Image (tube, rainbow, N blue to C red):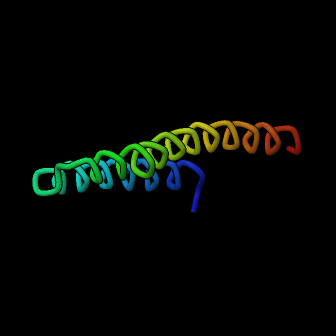
Amino acid sequence: MSVSSGQGRLGKAIKEVQADFAELKRYWNDDAAEKFEKNHIAPLVLNGRAAIEAMGHIEHLLLKMKRDCE
């Protein structure tokens, strides 16, 4: 798997989690749901986006290393 395909898969998974939780909130809309979103969903999304960004940096470095070795 390439780094860019991993980025895409992670991005898609984040979007799915957000969409699924948005759907769930239609039925589960209380203080516990808010707390769960704040403590679990929001950090998951934030960390996932940070990971995607880091993967972009890694891909850039890998390409640079490859060019330097040629």
Could you say where residue 35 lies in the image, as x and y percent from the top left? 36, 48
Left or right: 69 with respect to 41? right
Residue at horizontal 44%, vertical 44%? 45
Residue pushed farthest right? 69
Taking depth in this image into account, of 33 and 64 the one nearest to the observer is: 33
Taking depth in this image into account, of 42 and 10 the one nearest to the observer is: 42
Above or below for 28 versus 62: below
Left or right: 57 with respect to 22? right
Left or right: 68 with respect to 24? right
Taking depth in this image into account, of 33 and 45 the one nearest to the observer is: 33
Residue pushed farthest bottom? 1
Above or below for 25 versus 53: below
Above or below for 53 versus 34: above
Residue pushed farthest front? 31
Residue at horizontal 16%, vertical 53%? 23
Figure quadrant of the N terminus: bottom right
Residue at horizontal 30%, vertical 45%? 34
Could you say where residue 37 lies in the image, as x and y percent from the top left? 35, 47
Residue at horizontal 40%, vertical 43%? 38
Figure quadrant of the C terminus: top right
Report the number of discs. 0
Could you say where residue 16 lies in the image, as x and y percent from the top left? 30, 54
